[in-house]
Image: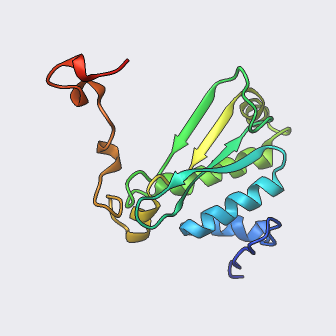
Amino acid sequence: ASLRAAPAQSNVTVNPREWADKLNSTYLSNAELGWWMLEYVQRCAPLGRRFAIGSSAVDRQPLRVLEISDNPGLQEAEPNFKYVANMHGDETSGRALLPLLAEWLCENYKTDERATRMVRDMHLFIMPTMNPDGFSRYRRYNAQGIDLNRNFSDPQFDCQPTLENCSA
C-alpha cells in the first residue's frame, strides 16, 4: 500500500504499519518525516513530543525534533541526549536510523529493561535531519552552499585580533 498524505488536522490517519514498512525500505521525504513524528507522538503517547527549533534557510522546511521521555516537555534532573542526523544532505544513514530508534523505544517501553530505563531515566531529543534542503537536493551543503559541519561560531576567532571585542 502506498503511504497516504497525512491530513492537516492533528488526528493523523496513516496506518502505523505503513510507516514501519516505509521506514524499513526507503528514506522518508521531509514532509513524511513530519507526518511520521506527528503520528508517533499520538501512537506512543505519552512518551513523545514533536516541536520545531526553526526552519531551513531557503526552502523554509521545519527543523523538527522528537523528544522521547516518560515526561516529555518537563525539565528533570536527568541526562539529555541529542541525536542529530543528516547534517550533510548526502549522508543519510542517520536520517533512516533515528526514526528506527524511536520506534524501538515506543515498541519496547515497559517490556524491555533497557528501553524502559532509557525512556524513564533520560530525555532523548531526536533530530532526523539538520539539513532538509540538502537532503532534497542530495547535496552535502545546504541550499545556500554552506557546509553545516563547518559553520559553527568560534568565539576566539570572532574576537580577533584581541579578545577586547568579546562580551562575557
Specify the farthest residue to the left: 161
Relative to the observer, which residue lies in front, 75 or 159? Answer: 159
Point out residue 48 in the picture as x, y percentages from the top left corner. 75, 46
Left or right of 158? Residue 60 is right
Point out residue 83 in the picture as x, y percentages from the top left corner. 54, 41
Residue located 32% across and 58% down the image: 141
> Which image quarter is the N terminus in?
bottom right
- The correct choice, above or below, for 26 with respect to 94 in the image is below
Left or right of 96? Residue 34 is right
Relative to the observer, which residue lies in front, 25 or 53? Answer: 53
Note whether residue 24 is visible: no
Point out residue 128 in the picture as x, y percentages from the top left corner. 55, 53
- The correct choice, above or below, for 110 with respect to 52 in the image is above
- The correct choice, above or below, for 113 with respect to 100 in the image is above
Point out residue 125 in the picture as x, y percentages from the top left corner. 62, 40
- The correct choice, above or below, for 133 with respect to 44 in the image is below
Relative to the observer, which residue lies in front, 73 or 46? Answer: 73
Q: Looking at the rendering, which quadrant does residue 57 occupy?
A: bottom left
Specify the farthest residue to the bottom: 1
